[in-house]
Image: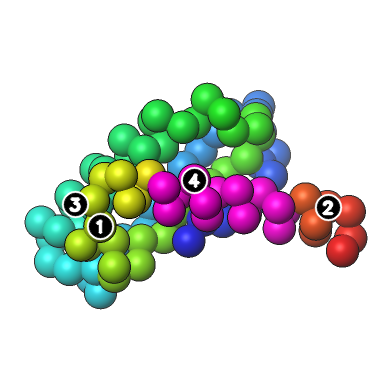
Amino acid sequence: MVHLRPTTDDGAQHVGFVVARSVGGAVVRNRVRRRLRNVVVEQHDTWPTGVDVVVRALPPAAEATYADLARDFSSAFSAAGRRAKARAVGL
């Protein structure tokens, strides 16, 4: 799940990760966090400036491959962008 919100500072991109205990033990949570961080590094150049991003890993992320996480992140980011645009125009 990805949440976007406009930022009020210099337009820098901020990213936060939420990986709860329900995902797995510490080793699993850290592996998921590292993989998500790499996905973000690969894709952040395509983002609009001035947004803060919060990525919440759900329990199935523990069994997901890197390719699965990258695909799911892209899909969730696109959906969050569409929701943000809809809110901006008052739909």
Q: Amino acid at mark 3?
A: Asn
Q: Amino acid at mark 4?
A: Ser
Quarter residue 64 falls in = bottom left
Q: Amino acid at mark 1?
A: Ala
Chain part drawn in magenta: 71-84
Q: Real-space Cα distance between discs 4 and 2?
A: 21 Å
Disc 4 residue crowd, few under 14, some 14–19, many 20+, Cα 10 Å:
some
Residue designated by label 4 = 74
As helix, strand or loop, the secondary structure at mark 4 comes to helix
Q: Real-space Cα distance between discs 3 and 2?
A: 35 Å
Tell me if residue 49 comes above or below residue 58 in the rendering.
above
Q: Position of residue 23 (x, y in %)?
A: 24, 68
Task: Specify whether residue 73 is painted magenta.
Answer: yes
Viewer-nearest residue: 85 or 27:
85
Residue designated by label 2 = 88
Q: Amino acid at mark 2?
A: Ala
Tell me which label, 1 or 4, sits earlier in the chain.
1
Residue designated by label 3 = 30
Q: Tell me the number on the disc at residue 46.
A: none
**Residue 91 in sight from this viewpoint:** yes
Tell me which label, 4 or 3, sits earlier in the chain.
3
As helix, strand or loop, the secondary structure at mark 1 comes to loop
Q: Is 25 placed left or right of 90 in the picture?
A: left
Q: Main secondary structure of the magenta part?
A: helix
Tell me which label, 4 or 2, sits earlier in the chain.
4
Residue designated by label 1 = 64
Q: Real-space Cα distance between discs 4 and 3?
A: 21 Å
Quarter residue 6 falls in = top right
